Image (cartoon, rainbow, N blue to C red):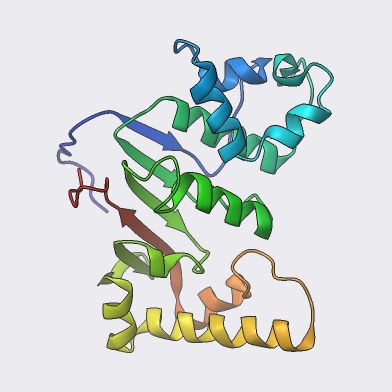
């Protein structure tokens, strides 16, 4: 592990942790988080993060107080509020620590299409995503595979598939399992494979991916 050194970045950073947190305030205050309120931007983020139906169910909409003194939110709702907060900050670089792990498959796809992925709200931002799910990996710019506590492979999707390493086997297992689930029935959850089993079998602990800011540059 690196215990000292320096990291140089260009621009503002926003961080979405795997364990989402909220403050004792309204939903809107949790998202805007002190920045000037922009109704148009806010509405776009609410839709992109799939929060519209949740706000309709809350007694006072986005003015409902959440947190210890307010309404309790589910883990998936907290994660989407956390993601919405980060998007509203309009940072240059986004560090996303497995933000899709707390949501189900259709919400995962909605967040990818509308926020994180190449056509989402963050399409012009640099995004570093840590994930155990692998069903989006062919759409990213760079993949870093962690195995047994170290970086085992880096490269683009097609490049890693051609090396025949742990990543290649991971994708093959995913395709086989997803095909079997489709063939024999059952709903797909998360990435569509037994992620605990895949880590035991191939030692793959995390996959980190990067997506550039649309200009071909990474910060």
Vertical side of 91 occupied by 127: above or below:
below
Most extreme residue toward the front, as rendered? 40
Vertical side of 199 occupied by 60: above or below:
above
Vertical side of 204 occupied by 42: above or below:
above
| Left or right: residue 24 compared with residue 154 | right
Please provide percent x and percent y for residue 115.
49, 44
Asked whether 217 or 10 is in front, the reply is 217
Q: Quadrant of residue 57?
A: top right
Instruction: Determine the residue positioned at 32% across, 65% down.
Output: 143
Asked whether 127 or 173 is in front, the reply is 127
Q: Is any part of residue 101 visible from this angle?
A: no
> How many numbered marks does the figure carry?
0
Q: Quadrant of residue 176?
A: bottom right
Asked whether 62 or 151 is in front, the reply is 62
Q: Is any part of residue 12 visible from this angle?
A: yes
In which quadrant is the C terminus drawn? top left
Instruction: Determine the residue positioned at 38% across, 32% down.
Output: 14
In which quadrant is the N terminus drawn? bottom left
Please provide percent x and percent y for residue 16.
47, 38
Asked whether 106 or 99 is in front, the reply is 106
Please provide percent x and percent y for residue 6.
15, 38
| Left or right: residue 117 compared with residue 105 | left
Instruction: Determine the residue positioned at 69% across, 66% down.
Output: 189
| Left or right: residue 163 compared with residue 187 | left
| Left or right: residue 12 compared with residue 82 | left
Q: Quadrant of residue 152?
A: bottom left
């Amino acid at each position: 592990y690196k215990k000292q050194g320096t990291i140089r970045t260009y621009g503002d950073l926003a961080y979405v942790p795997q364990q989402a947190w909220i403050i004792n305030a309204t939903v809107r205050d949790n998202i805007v988080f002190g920045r000037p309120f922009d109704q148009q931007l806010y509405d776009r983020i609410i839709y992109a993060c799939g929060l519209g139906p949740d706000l309709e169910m809350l007694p006072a909409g986005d003015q409902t107080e959440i947190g210890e003194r307010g309404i309790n939110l589910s883990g998936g709702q907290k994660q989407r509020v956390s993601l919405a907060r980060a998007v509203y900050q309009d940072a240059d670089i986004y560090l996303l620590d497995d933000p899709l792990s707390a949501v189900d498959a259709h919400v995962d796809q909605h967040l990818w299409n509308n926020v994180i992925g190449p056509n989402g709200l963050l399409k012009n931002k640099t995004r570093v995503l840590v994930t155990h799910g692998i069903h989006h990996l062919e759409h990213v710019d760079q993949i870093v595979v962690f195995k047994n506590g170290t970086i085992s492979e880096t490269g683009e999707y097609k490049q890693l598939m051609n090396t025949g390493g742990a990543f290649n086997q991971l994708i093959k297992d995913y395709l086989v399992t997803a095909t079997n689930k489709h063939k024999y029935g059952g709903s797909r959850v998360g990435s569509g494979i037994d992620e605990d089993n895949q880590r035991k079998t191939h030692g793959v602990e995390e996959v980190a991916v990067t997506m550039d800011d649309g200009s071909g540059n990474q910060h």
